[in-house]
Image: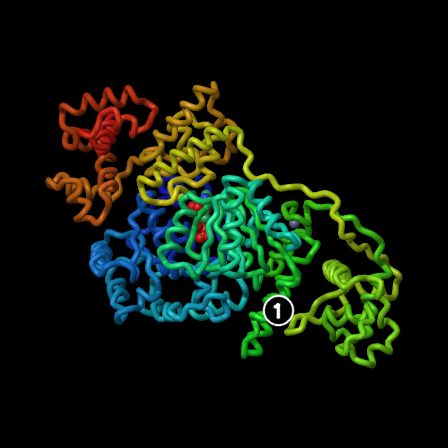
């Protein structure tokens, strides 16, 4: 069995585990089941991918979304791992070919939707029973639960699969953590007792902010213009708004497109593709957008309308900053939105209405709170958190306060006189002495009726919110959010305790800094290079390297391969494929600017180096070598093994590098010396420069082979 740290570095190019990844991975390798709760972007995939790689045999990954499957499979293949997917969009022929590869032990990871898995009398399950299956991973496992927000009936059948495949470890992974859903997953799958791994849901790199919705579209334009060239998502509730807002942005020369479920499939696919491939900066979308995308360099997520609940909001904002770099979540908040939404959630089911209504109330409270937004979010999801995070608008804004004791006394005694059974609206009307028929007659006889006439309704809302934030009042759960006295109420009512309230004006606010780069030109140039490789490989740029990798490159300026391998994201395959080209750009830039390597500035922990070139040949490499020695050509081998020619090429080149395969078995003698001199001439400029110099008579394979032999 391979060391999991070695796999992390060699295959994925990363230097250390995050959160509880290491614990989870070891647990699964020991044959145990696991339930993994981690926020979006936390790194769930590695939790099953590394065990899968460390063990012999194939891992099954059940995933609900076809787009996501393809993304994951592409990412694995770029790192040299044999991953395939099966779904209903593929031709019969392709599906059969995948199944054959599965039978022949050619696949390390098989991604499949539950619908496909259980289709046709569970044919596929039968196949799986007869292969060396090392692990079953259930992605988006909250789909099992009816309590979750996207229940998928087919997921309930996984429980049966677990019985059929007794002995194979099962992992359930999700970013939705509420206790009911969690319990449902554990019960349904009968995961073994010690199986839970809950990570903090805190997304440190995302800063949270809320702004009043007045003039939101102007504010939005300004916000985006200040972030020119960065990727962002803007969510609205209606399709019409997505069209209007994207047009508005275009008028300001912002590269933006609309996305919603009303567009035809091909337009949707094209637009999503443009966004993923950095061809447009901003998508203005309904929540239909984003489910299936994994784009790691989304720098901001803006909500123009109030979402229905915090689960959805947190998931949507979570699409920002998967690469771990600073990102922003901005909500435009209005109470008017809440009224509209409340109509939407009315159904025939009373219990359901109450649940949804409670969730909406929590969403409104998030928008209105003056306390740390991160703390509010984390506590909502059942985690304790510090009072201040330093990275949300409330934490970076100072509010001017005033002595609001009298106001507080009025509000608290009103709540108390009304026996703590009325909602905010009623209490305010009561305080303001409203003549409305809604106010019960006996209430108009009370002493506190009308004591708050001098304060406008909207101002009362703010004050009451403030009193709730500070524990003087509380809002009870239930269909109607009823105001009750909070733990600190008695001191104010009976002990003359002073209360500070917030004035509306904001004194000073600090803007969060996003990217702080010294060598922006180099960063741009590396981005360009990444784009070139991405279109060559037909994958999104972030799958070649994340922005984080490019930032590290332009910050630490590695000068040779030994330094390059220390950069996050450079595994062995990517090192071979792209290392030289990126290094070439950096060296050229450094030469022009007279800059030295800055690797010394890299945190020490990261400098533990793994083996650069693995001395161990894997079984898959050996298999390619065997076929080659049997007289098959590279395209043949690719066909036989159902791998790409590129992969086979890399396998063979590995052996040339180790002098276990004769160079001239791939490159004719007369070409070798020409390639050698071309390599010499174009040193540091990347293989494409060498290729350009040599012309069409020479292939990349030949050039790479000669290079490996040197
Ligand atoms: P999730 O599925 O939990 O939303 P992913 O598995 O997609 O998250 O991981 C998010 C990003 O973080 C990916 O780009 C992934 O490669 C990266 N990542 C995961 N684990 C690590 C790690 N230990 N070190 C560096 N990057 C990591
Ligand atoms: Zn905060």
Residue that mark 1 sits on:
358
Q: Is residue 562 visible?
A: yes
Quadrant of the image occupied by residue 471 = bottom right
Q: Residue furthest left?
A: 631
> Which quadrant holds the C terminus?
top left
Q: Residues within 10 Å of mark 1 (few under 14, many from 20)?
A: some
Residue 344, percent from left and from top: 56, 70
Picture quadrant where residue 115 is located: bottom left
Secondary structure type for disc 1 = helix
Say if 84 sits above or below 414 in the image: above
Q: Is residue 404 left or right of residue 658?
A: right
The image quadrant that residue 314 belongs to is bottom right
Ligand 2 lies under 8 Å from the Cβ of mark 1: no
Asked whether residue 29 appears in the rendered view, the answer is no
Q: Position of residue 74 (x, y in %)?
A: 34, 48
- Residue drawn at 85 percent across, 57 percent down: 498
Residue 248 in the image: above or below residue 360: above
The residue lying at 29 percent from left, 60 percent from top is: 89
Q: Is residue 450 left or right of residue 693?
A: right
Left or right relative to 277: residue 463 = right
**Relative to 261, is 76 above or below?**
above
State how the image is colored: rainbow
Q: Is residue 697 above or below residue 392?
A: above
389 or 439: nearer the viewer: 439
Instruction: Please state the horizontal and vertical placement of residue 702, each as a whole percent of the image.
Output: 20, 31
534 relative to 469 in the view: left or right: left
Residue 265 at x, y = what percent? 37, 58
């Amino acid at each position: 069995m391979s060391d999991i740290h070695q796999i992390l570095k060699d295959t994925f190019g990363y230097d250390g585990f995050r959160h509880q990844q290491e614990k989870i991975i070891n647990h699964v390798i020991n044959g145990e089941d696991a339930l993994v709760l981690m926020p979006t972007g936390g790194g769930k995939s590695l939790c099953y991918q590394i065990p899968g790689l460390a063990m012999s045999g194939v891992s099954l990954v059940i995933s609900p979304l076809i787009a996501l499957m393809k993304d994951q499979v592409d990412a694995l293949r770029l790192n040299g791992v044999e991953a395939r997917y099966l779904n209903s969009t593929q031709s019969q022929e392709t599906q059969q070919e995948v199944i054959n590869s599965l039978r022949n032990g050619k696949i390390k990871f098989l991604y499949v939707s539950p619908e496909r898995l259980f289709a046709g009398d569970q044919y596929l399950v039968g196949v799986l029973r007869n292969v060396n299956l090392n692990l079953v991973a259930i992605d988006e496992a909250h789909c099992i639960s009816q309590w979750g927000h996207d229940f998928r009936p087919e997921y309930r059948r996984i429980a049966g699969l677990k019985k059929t495949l007794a002995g194979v470890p099962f992992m359930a992974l999700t970013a939705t953590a509420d206790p009911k859903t969690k319990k449902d997953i554990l019960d349904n799958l009968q995961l073994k007792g010690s199986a839970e791994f809950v990570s903090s849901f805190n997304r440190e790199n995302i800063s949270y902010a809320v702004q009043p919705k007045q003039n939101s579209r102007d504010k939005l334009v300004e916000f985006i213009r200040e972030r020119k060239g960065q990727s962002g998502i803007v969510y609205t509730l209606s399709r019409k708004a997505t069209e209007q807002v994207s047009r508005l942005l275009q008028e300001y020369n912002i590269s933006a497109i609309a996305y919603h479920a009303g567009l035809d499939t091909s337009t949707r696919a094209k637009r999503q593709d443009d966004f993923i491939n950095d061809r447009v900066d901003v998508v203005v979308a309904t929540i239909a957008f984003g489910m299936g995308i994994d784009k790691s360099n989304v720098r901001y997520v803006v909500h123009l309308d109030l979402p229905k609940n915090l689960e959805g909001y947190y998931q949507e904002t979570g699409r920002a900053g998967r690469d771990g770099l600073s990102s922003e979540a901005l909500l435009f908040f209005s109470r008017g939105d809440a009224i509209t939404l409340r109509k939407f959630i009315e159904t025939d089911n009373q219990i359901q209405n109450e649940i949804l209504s409670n969730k909406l109330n929590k969403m409104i409270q998030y928008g209105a709170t003056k306390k740390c937004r991160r703390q509010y979010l984390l506590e909502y999801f059942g985690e304790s958190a510090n009072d201040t995070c330093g990275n949300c608008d409330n934490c970076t804004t100072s509010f001017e306060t005033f002595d609001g004791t009298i106001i507080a006394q009025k509000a608290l005694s009103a709540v108390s006189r009304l026996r703590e059974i009325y909602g905010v609206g009623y209490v305010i009307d009561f305080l303001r002495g409203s003549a409305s028929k809604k106010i019960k007659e006996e209430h108009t006889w009370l002493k506190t009726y009308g004591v708050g006439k001098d304060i406008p309704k909207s101002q009362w809302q703010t004050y009451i919110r403030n009193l709730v934030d500070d524990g003087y009042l509380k809002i009870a759960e239930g269909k109607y959010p009823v105001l009750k006295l909070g733990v600190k109420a008695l001191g104010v009512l009976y002990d003359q305790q002073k209360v500070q309230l917030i004035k509306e004006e904001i004194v000073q606010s600090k803007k969060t800094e996003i990217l702080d780069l010294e060598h922006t030109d180099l960063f741009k140039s590396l981005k360009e290079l990444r784009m070139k490789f991405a279109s060559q490989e037909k994958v999104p740029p972030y799958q070649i390297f994340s922005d984080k990798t490019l930032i590290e490159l332009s910050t630490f300026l590695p000068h040779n391969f030994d330094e390059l391998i220390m950069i996050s994201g450079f595994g062995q395959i990517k090192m071979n494929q792209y290392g030289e080209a990126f290094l070439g750009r950096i060296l050229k830039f450094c030469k022009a600017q007279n800059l030295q390597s800055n690797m010394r500035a890299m945190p020490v922990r990261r400098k533990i180096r793994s083996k650069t070139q693995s001395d161990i040949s894997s079984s898959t490499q050996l298999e390619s070598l065997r076929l080659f020695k049997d007289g098959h050509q590279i395209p043949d081998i690719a066909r036989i093994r159902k791998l790409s020619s590129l992969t086979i090429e890399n396998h063979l080149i590995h052996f040339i590098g180790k002098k276990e395969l004769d160079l001239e078995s791939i490159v004719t003698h007369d070409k070798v010396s020409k390639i050698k001199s071309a390599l010499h001439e174009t040193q540091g400029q990347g293989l494409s420069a060498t290729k350009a110099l040599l012309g069409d008579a020479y292939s990349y394979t030949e050039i790479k082979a000669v290079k490996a032999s040197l």
